[in-house]
């Protein structure tokens, strides 16, 4: 199941990321994902492991996985 909603031309997707435990972790993940073309905002929450991404179009999951990997965490999938 993919958690995606389309609001006013923007697509919101919620990803599950394992290993985040603090604000620094959240910032690392959000920073890497925000560099993907088309991403307009990212909010990572360590306590739930959820990362909410707003983008202009659907993102390639492998690009998101690579960004999360670069931050040192693991993309589990979509929430």
Image (cartoon, rainbow, N blue to C red):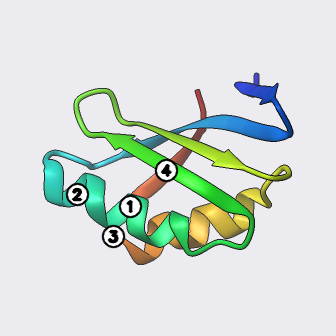
Residue 15 screen position, x and y as percent: 56, 39
Q: Position of residue 71 (x, y in %)?
A: 36, 71
Q: Is residue 25 above or below residue 44?
A: below
Which sits earlier in the primary sequence, circle 3 or circle 1?
Answer: 1
Q: Quadrant of the C terminus?
A: top right
Describe the element under mark 2 as helix, strand or loop.
helix
Alpha carbon distance from label 2 to label 4: 13 Å
Which residue does the image show at 69% across and 35% down from the upper left? 12
Q: Is residue 26 above or below residue 33?
A: above
Drawn side of residue 51 relative to residue 61, left or right: left
Looking at the picture, does residue 41 appear above or below residue 72?
above
The answer to which quarter of the image holds residue 46 is top left
Q: Which callout, 3 or 2, points at the residue further toward the start of the chain?
A: 2
Residue 69 numbered tag: none
For marks 3 and 1, give the CA distance: 8 Å
Image depth: mark 2 or mark 4 in front: 4
Disc 3 from disc 2: Cα separation: 9 Å
Q: Which mark is residue 72?
A: 3
Q: Which residue is mark 1?
A: 29
| Relative vertical location of residue 38 with respect to residue 12 in this rendering, above or below | below
For the N terminus, the quadrant is top right
* Cα–Cα gap, marks 4 and 3: 17 Å
Pointer 2 and pointer 1: residues touching (CB < 8 Å)?
A: yes
Mark 1 or mark 4, which is nearer to you?
Answer: 4
Q: Which-is-in-front pick, marks 4 and 3?
A: 4
Q: Is residue 59 left or right of residue 75?
A: right
- What residue does disc 2 label? 25
């Amino acid at each position: 199941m993919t958690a995606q909603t389309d609001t006013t031309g923007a697509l919101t997707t919620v990803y599950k990321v394992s290993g985040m435990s603090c604000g620094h972790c959240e910032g690392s993940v959000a920073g890497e994902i925000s560099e993907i073309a088309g991403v307009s905002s990212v909010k990572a929450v360590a306590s739930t492991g959820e990362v909410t991404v707003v983008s202009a179009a659907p993102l390639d999951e492998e690009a998101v996985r690579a960004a999360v990997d670069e931050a040192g965490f693991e993309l589990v999938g979509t929430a």
